[in-house]
Image: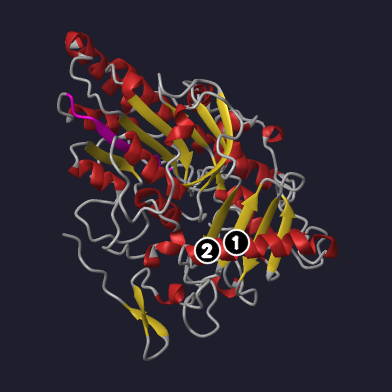
Amino acid sequence: MTGIFPGTGMQKHLRVVAFSILVFLPLVGVAESSKPNILFCIADDASMKSFGAYGDTFIETPAIDKLAREGLVFENAFNGNPKCAPARASLVAGMYSWQLKEAANHWPLFPEEFAFYPHILMEKGYHVGFTGKGWGPGVYKTEHNPAGPAYNSIKTKPPYKGINKIDYAGNFAAFLDEKEDRQPFCFWLGVKEPHRAYEEDSWKKANRNLNDATVPGFYPDNETIRGDLLDYGLEVEWYDRHVGLAVELLEERGLLDNTLIIVTSDHGMPFPRVKGQIYEEAFRVPFIVYWNGVVTPGRILSDYISFADVAPTLMEAAGFEAHPQMTGSSFLSMLKAEDSGRFDASRDHVLLGKERHDTGRANEDGTDLGYPVRAIRTDEYLYVKNFKPERWPVGNPEYGWRNCDGSPTKDFITQLDPDSADYRYYSLNFGKRSGEELYRIKEDPDCLVNLADNPIYTCVKERLHDQMVAELTEQGDPRMLGQGDIFDKYPHEGKIFNYDTGKMEGFKHPSRP
């Protein structure tokens, strides 16, 4: 790793920190709080399968893989909604995205009525902060980001263009410098990578080989896409680097033994048919927990957990009751168990959904409409209900397929000729979809063969549909109660729905305190 990411400003900072630790070493331990510290590490757009702990072979993530070996790996962790703002909203609020009103969308105004676990812990005496990307993108009216006060002043020189200059680990060190003796902390290490854009062909600088990349079955296999995947992989490695530096800081300051560390990502990689889509790689996320003396090393759990479960878990771990608004369920007891496998037999499925992500997606009536979806994922199947199949799922072609980040991969696929033998990849990634989809997930993790119209699976489809609807109705999902179009009318990106004209019009966001 040192050969890939040569000399950063962080190295000098760490030397200064190390000297300070040696000078004040006798004080370490005495000042440690009895309450656990919390280090929550989250990547921006990194797929689960991009980490060695989950079987990756071409991206190097030694720091995170070490935490996985010495901690607990969740095989079935899900974000609930595969886009930055709604996924992160579930994390901070401890609720499912369809329960969060405007915050179910991308670029929303986060309603003031919801409580955030970082703010609650701050009120209860925790030293709280975040670096990089907290909750967002969107607008909030609280004094601080829902993830807490920002620590972004320390910068570094990244090895490639496209990598943010924020020194995440350096800002974590600055945050720790401000912590009072015996004060527990809760820190959100929100690395902005591997969000696009990337320095194209940066893989060449790192002496990588095109043959090393693993191409998913929903893309054509060529040099353009392999190179794009390798460029992406280097930014995943940047995330791993800063997780490793953060762990080193904890070790140096004698804080590691009393710190609960979580490593995850908000959703899958920023590529077509992944980010923002209700398919396996988009919503199934890495989730690794390290907690020395509490989490038995080397465990692997198959229990299903969702981002809505994280806030109540952290509240319980800190010794507090979950906020009454939180609808997720704590999985703290799973962390404290000793065996692998499935701890709780009832955690055998998860619910998923999306509403409006990026704008320009479906404008047939002059407004920016979403592509509403709900889904249920079990051990065997993924059932998907597309409520508006007449709309374009990734956005209208004339508006540039806005719910897919720009990339060499996107350019290649959208420029395929209809007469090309590879044109099926355009249909898979950007074409319209049927009202229902059903996939045998173990046999078809790329979700390529839709079984929804196969009569052999009619009973399975109906059973999953009914279970999904029943649970979402119990949770008060407006989409189940005949009120789902409200999600299209919530304000976003400087616009708000005008009920008189039936269109989105200019909207001035409320200023923050």
Q: Which residue is drawn at 49% across and 56% down?
A: 83
Amino acid of disc 2: Leu
**Mark 2, other Cα within 10 Å: few <14 / some 14–19 / many ≥20:** many
Q: What stretch is highlighted in magenta?
A: 182-192
Is the C-beta separation of discs 2 and 1 under 8 Å?
A: yes
Q: Is mark 2 on a helix, strand or loop?
A: helix
Pick whichever, 1 or 387, lies toward us: 387
Q: Residue at x 41, y 77 (%)?
A: 489
Q: In the figure, 65 relative to 221: above or below?
A: above
Residue 112 percent location from the top left of the image: 26, 63
Q: Is mark 1 on a helix, strand or loop?
A: helix
**Residue assigned mark 1:** 468
Pick whichever, 455 or 386, lies toward us: 455
Can residue 378 be seen at all in this image of the molecule? yes
Residue 508 percent location from the top left of the image: 26, 73
Residue 464, image quadrant: bottom right
Q: In the figure, 410 relative to 174: above or below?
A: below
**Residue assigned mark 2:** 472
**Mark 1, other Cα within 10 Å: few <14 / some 14–19 / many ≥20:** many
Residue 252 percent location from the top left of the image: 30, 16
- Would you say 176 lies left or right of 324 here? left
Pick whichever, 349 or 9, lies toward us: 349
Residue 304, image quadrant: top right
